[in-house]
Image: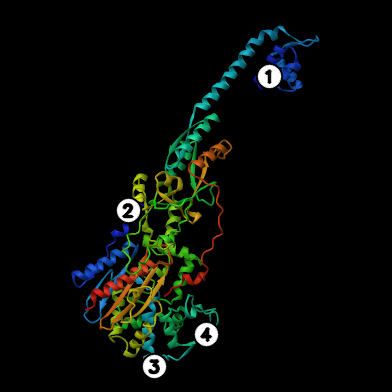
């Protein structure tokens, strides 16, 4: 530890964007707030109707963790809408072979059979890894990637199933969470990941710009087909986690639809806030913490504060 | 042949005119004394004593050689004395932490004089104390080790501005209590959370890492930890309520600060009193010195390690991607 390192967080100045000086100021304030907590990353908020936006670091590709479940869901819903997949098709998940995860079917100890449409619900409402990988079995990552490419979703790359993240972390660190976290944080400082799924070249990745563009097209029915985008909007509105971007946007007059993503030191969320007044703002926050802690509520709160500041700066 | 021992036997026998009284004076058995005298006679090529009568007498050769023998023994005695006084006058440097209690160090210096050695105390940062033992510039040093392996433990705690009621035995402070509180509506705005200052004495690799990790796990940004710089500056900030200083209780009390121990004993200081490897390969530290040096850093009796178990959970699921 040296004074230079202690003050190093303040020296981090990602490129801020904003449509006018006031919006750039808000972006800079958010960046400074995050830096003070030892958080690096990208943030972008876009008003879906005025096109006004603010953010920083928006073109940096970041491993998506569970945020990748949104593009997967869109491709699966598009297949269902095209009649190539049946939403009622039953899939049996065996706990002995299904993916590792703390929630949903991934945490089940006995076999369960669920329909494809409900796997989507589990995947988006409680971030169920087993449900997500059951869907990846039906639509492989390469096909999801090709579909996104065909839609012109530059900046989002899909390369692997959800369980690959666990396999890579466990492969590098055994079943030791602290060690894996230590590796992730150390590699972040060194700039060279040992855990493959933390390397943008090998992970499911996306930039804030690309993810917000995807949300805008989903909310404006400018991608896939309206049946698919409507169902994706409905499912994202059912997410149970409200501790990140949503935490300062929780009133009866606002509706939040989002998807979080968490892996080791990564804490992400993308989503859209819709106000009764008609304002709709899409956001993406992709963060990497310089902290060896599994839980960091002050970082979650900083994400929530950023979402509220951005929404209030952008709404008409 | 140990010439000195044999000459002692000869001189004592000549003085006492009796083998038995000479053996008594030297505190050895008579047969050994007699054997030494005979060996010496063989060495010099003639008898030193006439044993034919009841009372032994010194021969002519014995009388002739006696002053030379006494001279050799006197010189040997002076050589031993010179060696002893040289040993006593050599000052042995002791590497100690900067925050030792001066009165306790003075006790160690006095005790050393009583034990016939002269010590000099040198305040040094922890890594220099270790290197001083290696390069021979230090005779002894208090060396930092992890508390669970150390011979002596010193509780570390946080010094803060003295409050209105400063309890005699403060409750332990847990790092997660240092997270800023969420404010209730209408509460005054929270001041910026104070940094946690770490003295040079605690900037040792194993502790830096352990403390930073504990701080992160307690939900604090690692940026809250800062190097303390000069202790007087650190205490000024601490007493003004702008910082918390990681230090020992005696040190905090000396500057009039309030103090509470850290709840996690793995974050306390551990010390061994160490010396360069002696002739037998192992460091040789007298017990009295180790005890007094430990007291000077404020070591308490060894604290019992509590069995610690973190919150249980599925270890695999923590490594997976989550919502």
Subunit under mark 1:
B
Residue A36 position, x and y percent, is 32, 61
Q: Residue furthest bottom?
A: A83
Q: N-terminal of the two: label 4 or label 2?
A: 2
- The residue tagged 4 is A112
Image quadrant in which the N terminus of chain B is located: top right
- The residue tagged 3 is A83
Q: Do pointers 2 and 1 mark residues of a single chain? A: no
Residue B161 disc label: none
- The residue tagged 1 is B6
Q: Note whether residue A152 is visible.
A: no
- The residue tagged 2 is A4
Q: Residue at x 58, y 16 (%)?
A: B75
Instruction: Out of A82 and B224, give the one closest to the viewer.
Output: B224
Q: Residue at x 30, y 76 (%)?
A: A283
Element class at badge 1: helix
Instruction: Out of B260 and B150, give the one closest to the viewer.
Output: B260
Total marks shown come to 4
Residue B120 position, x and y percent, is 46, 33
Subunit under mark 2:
A
Instruction: Out of A19 and A90, give the one closest to the viewer.
Output: A19
Subunit under mark 4:
A
């Amino acid at each position: 530890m040296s004074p230079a390192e202690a003050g190093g967080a303040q020296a981090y100045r990602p490129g801020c964007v904003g449509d006018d000086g006031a919006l750039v100021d808000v972006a800079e304030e958010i960046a400074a707030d995050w830096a003070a907590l030892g958080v690096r990353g990208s943030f972008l908020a876009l008003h879906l109707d005025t096109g006004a936006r603010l953010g920083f670091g928006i073109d940096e590709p970041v491993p998506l963790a569970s945020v990748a479940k949104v593009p997967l869901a869109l491709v699966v819903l598009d297949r269902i809408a095209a009649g190539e997949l049946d939403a009622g098709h039953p899939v049996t998940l065996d706990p002995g072979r299904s993916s590792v995860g703390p929630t949903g079917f991934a945490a089940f100890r006995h076999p369960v059979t669920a329909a494809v449409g409900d796997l989507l619900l589990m995947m988006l409402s409680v971030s169920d890894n087993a449900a997500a990988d059951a869907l990846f079995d039906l639509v492989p990552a390469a096909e999801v990637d090709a579909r996104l490419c065909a839609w012109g979703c530059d900046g989002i790359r899909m390369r692997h199933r959800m369980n690959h993240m666990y396999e890579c972390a466990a492969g590098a660190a055994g079943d030791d969470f602290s060690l894996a976290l230590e590796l992730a944080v150390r590699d972040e400082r060194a700039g060279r990941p040992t855990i493959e799924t933390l390397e943008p070249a090998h992970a499911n990745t996306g930039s804030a710009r690309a993810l917000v563009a995807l949300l805008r097209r989903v909310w404006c029915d400018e991608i896939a087909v309206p049946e698919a985008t409507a169902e994706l909007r409905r499912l994202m509105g059912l997410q149970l986690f409200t501790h990140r971007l949503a935490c300062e946007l929780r009133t009866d007059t606002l509706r939040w639809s989002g998807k979080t993503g968490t892996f080791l030191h990564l804490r992400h969320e993308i989503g859209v806030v819709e106000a009764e007044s008609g304002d709709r703002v899409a956001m993406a926050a992709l963060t990497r913490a310089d902290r060896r802690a599994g839980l960091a509520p002050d970082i979650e709160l900083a994400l929530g504060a950023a979402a509220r500041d951005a929404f209030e700066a952008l709404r008409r | 042949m140990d010439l000195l021992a044999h000459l002692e036997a000869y001189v004592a026998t000549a003085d006492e005119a009796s083998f038995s009284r000479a053996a008594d004076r030297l505190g050895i058995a008579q047969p050994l004394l007699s054997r030494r005298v005979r060996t010496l006679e063989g060495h010099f090529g003639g008898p030193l004593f006439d044993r034919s009568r009841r009372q032994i007498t010194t021969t002519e050769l014995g009388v002739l050689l006696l002053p030379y023998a006494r001279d050799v023994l006197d010189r040997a005695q002076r050589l031993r004395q010179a060696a002893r006084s040289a040993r006593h006058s050599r000052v042995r440097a002791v590497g100690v932490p900067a925050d030792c209690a001066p009165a306790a160090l003075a006790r160690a210096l006095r005790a050393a004089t009583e034990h016939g050695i002269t010590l000099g105390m040198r305040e040094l940062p922890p890594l220099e104390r270790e290197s001083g033992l290696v390069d021979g510039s230090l005779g002894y040093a208090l060396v930092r080790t992890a508390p669970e392996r150390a011979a002596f433990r010193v509780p570390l705690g946080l010094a803060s501005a003295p409050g209105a009621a400063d309890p005699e035995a403060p409750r332990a402070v847990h790092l997660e209590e240092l997270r800023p509180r969420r404010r209730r509506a209408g509460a005054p705005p929270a001041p910026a959370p104070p940094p946690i200052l770490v003295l040079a004495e605690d900037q040792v690799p194993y502790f830096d890492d352990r403390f930073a990790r504990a701080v992160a796990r307690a939900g604090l940004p690692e940026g809250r930890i800062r190097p303390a710089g000069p202790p007087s500056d650190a205490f000024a900030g601490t007493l003004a309520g702008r910082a918390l200083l990681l230090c020992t209780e005696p040190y905090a009390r000396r500057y009039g600060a309030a103090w509470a121990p850290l709840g996690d004993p793995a974050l306390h200081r551990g010390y061994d009193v160490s010396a360069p490897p002696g002739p037998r390969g192992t460091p040789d530290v007298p017990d009295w010195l180790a005890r007094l040096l430990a007291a000077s850093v404020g070591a308490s009796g060894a604290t019992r390690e509590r069995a610690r178990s973190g919150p249980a959970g599925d270890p695999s699921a923590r490594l997976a991607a989550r919502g």
